[in-house]
Amino acid sequence: MYSKRTIDEVKKSVDIVDFIGRYLNLEKSGSYFRGLCPFHSDNDPSFYVHPARGFFHCFGCGESGDVIAFLQKAEEVSFNDALKKLADFAGVVTESQTESQSLYERYVRLLACAADYYHSLVSHADCEEAKSYLTKERGLSQQTIALFKIGFALPSKRGLNDYLTGKGFRNSDLESAGLISGKGSKVKERFAGRLIFPIDNESGRTVALGARAFGDEIVPKYLNSPETKYFRKGRTLYNLSRAKTAATQLDFMVVVEGYFDVLGLHEVGVQNVVGVLGTAMTDAHVRMISGITNNLILFLDSDPAGLRACRRSIELAEKHGLQVAVATSDEKDPSDLLKRKGSAMVREALENAVPAPVFLVELLGRSLDLTNPEGKQKLFEHAKPIMQTYRSSGKIGSFQLVVSTLADLTGISEDMIFSTLKDPQRIRSRLRSTRSPLRPLERELIMVYLRFPDLRDRLLRILDLFESSEAFKKLENTMRAGSELEEVIRACDAQMGSEIMNLAAVPLDPTIAESILGEIEERVDKKIISEQIRTIDRKLQAQIDTGTKNSLMTRRIELSRLLKRVRKDGESVGKKQI
């Protein structure tokens, strides 16, 4: 049997679209992918894969599940065999693989011993200059140095080799782990003369070492352990094992570029911070973060390369449904900001992080002269593809932010921007579809239901008074049962299911969700009042008794005044006063 931790790690490490795409052709359609189902005779694509949620569903034969269930069905193998194959595919070591586990344990123990050795040298007399650099130049406390086990590799050829062979490791172990190179008297340490940063995996086991040159004569400046079965830069984030607890509690993660950026932010109390390892953010990185939180702050280098990386990271993270903000400063990176301007400015930069759509537009405006019409026109033209991308993908909140930022920077009214885009309707009307069996308000209710579980009780109270379409009524039972997306789409046909998957991927701001419910509640209030007025009118026509007529007329006047009040100021007071 495999533990839940192992099963979750395997599923998180496998890109379900990439893996299933090895068995059938998948085409992107909105927020999901679809193709011909491999499990039944399928002429019209009815097989859907939802990458953000990690599941598949066929609206033709009803097969559904995660990537493990797909492999079980596709190759007719057991759960354990499917999991083992996926673990091998993703490079994940599972606890039931005895021989591999033994190799893994030996590997991580070797790296941990190497990290301990290098960390012990920081206090060595010959390393005083390195220690002074860490504490005085970089501003790191002894506690931080100890917690992260920062070390130093003396420019010696055999120190590490002698230490580890004394611990029972073979030279071949050190060589395969990338700690040494050469044979016999020509053995050379990979990290000689460098500061050492142990790199842990998500479980907190040391799987690699990172190093920074200490001295201009050593190149390259940064160097990591070579990639192995247990360490891949594109699937590892520096400090993730420590950061995930704080990120879960605070519900956001900060991503930076370098070791010192992570250490500097940690030094000023930012514990929910991780760093990429000399590579751009990858799908695997985003999936790891999305398993912890859906909110991300990018605090990357401010040089051209860093800005390019930031744009790519925004696109990747938003593709996976994360809400992204960007922190910036006048310094090259967060570490330099801390060193030059202190901890208060680091915290201020994070507190002033702007939503990604705002950052993208402001970044375009930096190279333009917005004091003249030509510069404003260029900004609008450059920003137009961003607007169109957000709008076509249904990210209405992000689209609104781009429009409002353009209006602020150029002085052009939002209405004029909408007109230029040939879309004068309200932004939420982009969710309307003449082909959809659902009404616009019903689509909005589904969005709120899927994105905000804490608003479901309020939403269900609305449904008690809401006149639903026939299509929506089929979903009501699943919604009243508190079902999640996977269960909801099982109650749908292909058309409805694909629409709901798209709605589930629309980023929805909490304030907009509250506004949606408020407006629908107001409509329900108006409807209830109007129906009561119509009921009174019918009674008046049939009533002969003068006293009863007067009583009904008095009540009608009260309801008419109440209806005017609701229409005038939008107060949802109908149910309270009826």
Image (tube, grey):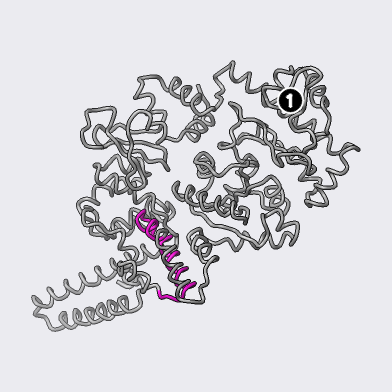
Report the side of 511 relative to 9 (left or right): left
Report the side of 57 relative to 134 (left or right): left
- Image point 22% across, 37% down: which residue? 44
Quarter of the image where one finds residue 201? top right
Q: Residue under circle 1?
A: 180
As drawn, which residue projects farthest toward the right?
125
Residue 15 pos. (x, y %): 45, 35
- In what element is the residue under mark 1? strand
Highlighted range, magenta:
387-413
Report the side of 294 relative to 433 (left or right): right
- Image point 36% across, 21% down: which residue? 75
Q: Looking at the picture, which amino acid does disc 1 mark?
A: Ile
Residue 96 pos. (x, y %): 54, 20
Is 223 situated above or below 557?
above
Report the side of 497 relative to 204 (left or right): left
Residue 400 pos. (x, y %): 41, 64
Q: Nearer the viewer, residue 552 or 36?
A: 36
Is 187 situated above or below 435?
above
